[in-house]
Image (cartoon, helix red, strand yellow):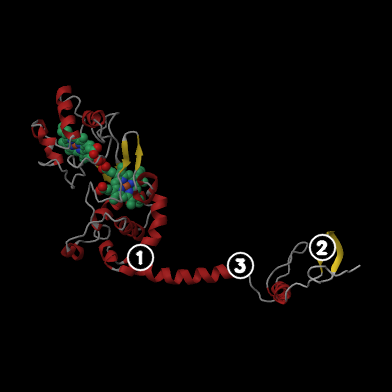
Amino acid sequence: MSEKHDVSGVPTTGHVWDEDLADLTNQPPKWWMLGLTASALFVVVYCIYYPAIPLMSTFTEGIGGWTAIKEMETDKGEVDAVRGKFEAKLKDMTPAAILADSELTEYVTRSGKVLFGDNCAACHGQNGAGTKDKEGFFAPILNDDVWLYGGTINHLYEGIVGGRQSMMMANKDILSADEIDTLANAIAKSQPNSTPLFAEKGCTACHGEDGKGMQAMGSANLTDNIWRFDGSIEGIKRTINFGVNSGDPKARVAVMPSFKEAGKLSESEMKKLAVYVFKFGGGQADAPAEVAATPNPVTAK
Ligand code: HEC
Ligand code: HEC
C-alpha cells in the first residue's frame, strides 16, 4: 500500500495520480493542530458559559447568567447617566452660553444631528444644504453664511422658536409690464439701483437703499447673485409680479413653522438645534456684550 514517493521520500497514501504526482502522508504542522484543539475547547467552554444550544421550546441558558437584554440595560444606564448630567446643565442655559461651552457644544452637536434629520431636513435638506424645486430653493440653505434673518445664535434660536414668514406684495396690478421688465433686468445683473425705479417704486423700503436686504424683514439681498427663488429673468419677473406669501395663487411660498407653537420640540431641543445649525459653519459671532445681555427668548416671555 504505502510506497515511498520517489522525489520527497515521504510515504504516500497509496494513491498515485501520475508518475511523481501522489498524495503524501505528511502530518499537519504543530501550530495548526494546537489551533484546532484550542478552538474546539473554546466552543465547549463558550457553550457551557453562554446561552447557546436551542432545545425544543427553550435553550441552554449557560452558567454565566448573561443575556443580551441585561447587557443592553447596563449600557443604557451608563449612557443615561452621562446624558442626564448634560441635559440638566442645558436646561438653565441660553443657546449663546451653550455655544460658549465647548464640551456642551460637542454633546449638543451630536444629538442635534438626529433632531435635525427628524424635524428640519425634509425642508432644509440633509446637513442644511437646502431643498430645491423648480421654483428655486423651497427652504433656504443653512450651511452657508448667507442669512435672510441673521446668523447669530440668537437669530437662529428665535427663528426655530417663533418660525419665519416674510412678505412681499404682488406687483402685477401696481407696476406696468415694462417697469417689471426693467426692474427684473437690473436685478438679474445684481444692480437693482441701476434703474431709478427701484427706489421710486418703493422696493428700497424692504430691500434697503443699497438693495442688500434687511434682516429684520428677511428681505433678500438683491446684489449678491445668490437666489432664494428662480434667478432667471423670467423667474425674477414672476417674484415681482406675484410676490412672496402675498396670498396670490402664483406667489412664492416661504413659511418656516414655529416649533414652539407646534409643541413638538422641548425648549432644550430647540436650543440644541440652534447650536447645531450654527455649527454648520455659517453662524455669525455675537458682539460679546450681546451674549451676556440677550435674554433667552423662550423663558423671557
Ligand atoms: C415646512 C418646511 C420647513 C421646516 C420643517 C423647517 N423650516 Fe426652517 N425655513 C423654512 C423656510 C421656507 C424658511 C425661509 C422663510 C422665509 O423665506 O421667510 C426657513 C428659514 C429658516 C431659518 C432662517 C434662515 C435665514 O436665512 O435666516 C432657519 C435658521 C431655519 N429655517 C432653521 C430650521 C430648523 C432648525 C428647522 C428644524 C427644527 C427648520 N428650519 C424646519 C422652511 C422650513
Ligand atoms: C414689503 C417688503 C418688500 C417690498 C416692498 C419689496 N420686497 Fe422683494 N422681497 C421681500 C422679501 C421679504 C423677500 C424675500 C422672501 C424670502 O426669501 O422668503 C423678497 C424677495 C425678492 C426677490 C427674490 C430674490 C431671490 O433671491 O430670489 C426679488 C427679485 C424681489 N424681492 C424684488 C423686489 C422688487 C423689484 C421690489 C419693488 C418693486 C420689491 N422686491 C419690493 C420683501 C419686499
Tell which residue pokes out farthest to the top in this image. 177
Q: Secondary structure at mark 2?
A: strand
- Position of residue 283 relative to residue 245, above or below, is below
Q: Quadrant of residue 299?
A: bottom left
In the rendered structure, which disc, 3 or 2, sits on the residue that comes first in sequence? 2
Residue 219 pos. (x, y %): 20, 42
Say if disc 3 is inside 8 Å of ligand 1. Answer: no
- Position of residue 188 relative to residue 125, above or below, is above
Please say if the residues under marks 3 and 2 sit with CB atoms less than 8 Å apart.
no
For image coordinates 14% across by 40% down, the residue present is 211
For image coordinates 40% across by 55% down, the residue present is 115
For image coordinates 18% across by 26% down, the residue present is 181
Few, some or many C-alpha atoms within 10 Å of disc 3 (few <14, some 14-19, many ≥20)? Answer: few
Residue 55 pos. (x, y %): 77, 64
Residue 223 visible in the displayed image: yes
Q: Residue 106 bears which disc, if any?
A: 1
Residue 7 pos. (x, y %): 79, 68
Residue at image mark 2: 22
Residue at image mark 3: 68
